Image (tube, rainbow, N blue to C red):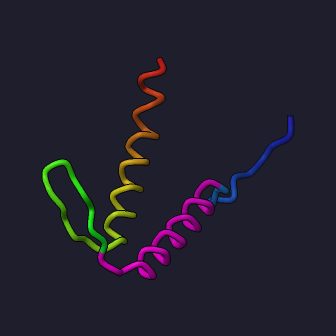
Amino acid sequence: MMNKEKSGVSVKLIINIIIAVLLIAFMIANRQMVDINLFVGTISTPIFMVILVSVILGWIMKWLVPKFKK
């Protein structure tokens, strides 16, 4: 077997940093207000908040779904 040394920075970390930077840039570029129709009414919020909440919910689902498959 070959002895592989770890360089300290993984590809996964680099990809996560790139995704985070792109997400932040996208959020900064989308500061316009948007109306969101809910079952009980309508709220007005900046688009970047909608993006942020969507990313957080997606991350939670990514974490929860494998736990239910077991």
Q: In terms of secondary structure, what is the magenta stretch mainly?
A: helix
Task: Verify whether residue 17 appears in magenta.
Answer: yes
Outermost residue, top side: 70
Residue 65 x, y percent position in the rendering: 44, 31
Is 6 left or right of 42, judged from the image as shown?
right
State yes or no: residue 20 in magenta.
yes
Q: Residue 53: which quarter of the image? A: bottom left
Can you say whether 47 is above or below 6 in the image?
below
Magenta residues (range):
12-33
Residue sitting nearer the eye, 31 or 11 = 31
Farthest residue to the right: give it. 1
- Residue visible at 63% across and 59% down in the picture: 8
Q: Nearer the viewer, residue 53 or 35?
A: 35
Q: Quadrant of residue 45?
A: bottom left
- Residue 17 placement (x, y as % from top left): 55, 66
**Left or right placement of residue 63 versus residue 15 in this view:** left
Residue furthest out toward the left: 40
- Which residue is depicted at the point 48% across and 21% down? 69
> Where is 56 relative to 25, above or below?
above
Give the residue at x 62% y 63%: 14
Quadrant including the N terminus: top right
Seen at 36% across and 48% down, the residue is 57
In this orientation, which residue lies closer to the viewer: 31 or 14? 31
Residue 70 image point, x, y percent: 47, 17
Q: How many marks?
A: 0
Position of 67 relative to 30 (above/below): above
**Which of the two residues, 14 or 7, is positioned nearer the viewer here?**
14
**Left or right of residue 51: residue 18:** right
